């Protein structure tokens, strides 16, 4: 289980926003974060990952403290073992498709499995600039999975995929999440396909000043 | 014609560029991170040689390196180092003089990289050092090359600082730009013309190279 009780002021002046979240997300499930644009959904994901520090509060994952403002403890990003799919993909222009995955794992069979799942097995030697937007987005998802994270954070992960491809990816992802017992938190606007009895929805409300 | 000043200029430019590459890349990276007052002051100081007359910089370096002053005396006493009127002095002066040409393009390139690129690497468990060498540095290769070429060309054309620090000692401090000045002083226009033409040709090739590199470098990595 991931337990959050955090406060973070985003921005400054009249455009500032007070992000305040107190909730918990079940392990081995998919949670979708919904909310209006500018509510701080991406910031919340980055706070969980450790890329942005909250002003106050605690973050716990599987009963381990990741952040505690009282004791000034912050577990390093590198040690949290999370996966992250960035909204802008954040691919490495100097690396090929295959190198992106081998940067995260040395398991060649797993790399092959991921490439097949993302339908990029014919494009292994291409650089990001030689891929379409949809292919880049799939590579970003595969790269996040390469480290077999216990917690996967995804920021609008399917926005560039067509409906058919998205359905195929989702089916494969569900299998991987079950197999690896991955806890998933994703920011998404659509994707009702993920809605099931096991999965949760978290509504983030805007608290602008 | 004595080609020694040309070789000396090329040697000075090559040594300065190599040393500046190792000094400039870490400074550029440090400056590209979160802005602080200290960094602002440091960046202003590094940029000073761009706007300051070379004779001003040369004058203060001459004072600093002179064995009759504290710093120069200390260098001579502890390291047996005489920087005034020596090639070593020229190298140190050139490093200070050409520092902004190495640092500015590399700093701009680091700042231009999306923040999420390094974050993606950290998330994958990679340290800051691993991220720097495997992700950040390879993605600014073109800018590093531009900085290297600009620094080399700039050092090659140095005159004011070299004259103040090094004087005109053949084989030691008499670089090509000084040789041109010296030849003109003695009305030897043939030699002055030869040195000038060689410097012009080398610099022209370098500048054309920079333009070719820049044409690709200004584009975003995904364009």
Image (cartoon, helix red, strand yellow):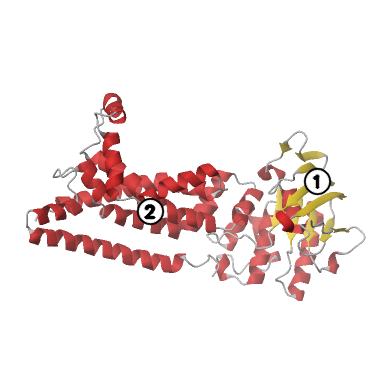
Contact between labelled residues 1 and 2, with CB atoms less than 8 Å apart: no
Point out the residue furthest to the left here.
Answer: B187
The residue marked by circle 1 belongs to what chain?
A: A
Q: Which residue corresponds to the image point at 88% horizontal and 64% vertical from the top-left?
A: A195
Q: CA distance from mark 2 to mark 1?
A: 45 Å
Is B80 placed left or right of A2 in the picture?
A: left
Residue in the image at 8% along x and 61% along y: B190
What residue would you read off at disc 1?
A6
Residue B79: give x, y in percent of width and height.
Answer: 29, 27
Front position in the image: A174 or B148: B148
Q: Is residue A135 left or right of residue B166?
A: right
The C terminus of chain B sits in image quarter: bottom right
Residue B207 locus on image (x, y percent): 32, 64
Side (left or right) of A87 relative to B139: right
Query: Which residue is at a point 28% across and 29% down the rendered structure image?
Result: B69
Q: Is residue A105 above or below residue A72?
A: below
Furthest residue toward top? B77
Q: Residues within 10 Å of mark 1 (few under 14, many from 20)?
A: many
Residue under label 2: B101
């Amino acid at each position: 289980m991931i337990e959050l009780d955090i406060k973070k002021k985003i921005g400054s002046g009249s455009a500032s926003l007070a992000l305040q979240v107190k909730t918990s997300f079940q392990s081995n499930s998919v949670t979708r974060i919904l909310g209006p644009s500018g509510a701080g959904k991406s910031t919340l994901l980055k706070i969980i990952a450790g890329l942005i520090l909250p002003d106050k509060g605690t973050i716990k994952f599987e009963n381990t403290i990741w952040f505690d403002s009282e004791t000034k403890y912050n577990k390093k990003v590198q040690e949290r073992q999370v996966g992250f799919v960035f909204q802008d993909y954040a691919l490495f222009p100097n690396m090929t498709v295959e190198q992106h995955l081998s940067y995260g794992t040395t398991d060649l069979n797993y790399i092959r499995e991921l490439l097949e799942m993302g339908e990029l097995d014919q494009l292994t030697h291409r650089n990001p600039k030689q891929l379409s937007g949809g292919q880049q987005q799939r590579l970003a998802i595969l790269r996040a999975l390469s480290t077999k994270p216990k917690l996967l954070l995804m920021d609008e992960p399917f926005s560039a995929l067509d409906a058919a491809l998205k359905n195929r990816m989702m089916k494969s992802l569900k299998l991987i999440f079950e197999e690896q017992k991955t806890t998933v938190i994703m920011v998404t606007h659509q994707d009702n396909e993920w809605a099931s009895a096991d999965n949760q929805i978290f509504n983030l409300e805007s608290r602008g000043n | 014609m004595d080609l020694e000043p040309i070789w000396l200029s090329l040697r000075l430019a090559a040594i300065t560029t190599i040393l500046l590459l190792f000094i400039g890349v870490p400074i550029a990276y440090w400056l590209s991170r979160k802005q602080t007052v200290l960094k602002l002051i440091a960046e202003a100081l590094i940029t000073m040689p761009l706007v300051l007359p070379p004779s001003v910089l040369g004058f203060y370096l001459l004072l600093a390196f002179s064995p009759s002053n504290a710093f120069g005396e200390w260098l001579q006493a502890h390291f047996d180092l005489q920087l005034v009127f020596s090639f070593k002095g020229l190298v140190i002066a050139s490093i200070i003089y050409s520092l902004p040409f190495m640092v500015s393009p590399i700093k701009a390139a680091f700042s231009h990289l999306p923040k999420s690129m390094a974050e993606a690497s950290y998330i994958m468990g990679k340290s800051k050092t691993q991220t720097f060498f495997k992700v950040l540095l390879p993605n600014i290769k073109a800018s590093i090359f531009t900085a290297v070429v600009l620094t080399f060309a700039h050092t090659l054309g140095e005159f004011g600082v070299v004259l103040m620090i090094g004087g005109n000692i053949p084989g030691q401090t008499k670089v090509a730009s000084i040789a041109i000045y010296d030849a003109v002083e003695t009305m030897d226009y043939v030699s002055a013309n030869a040195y000038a033409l060689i410097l012009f040709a080398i610099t022209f090739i370098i500048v054309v190279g920079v333009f070719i590199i820049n044409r690709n470098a200004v584009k975003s990595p995904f364009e």
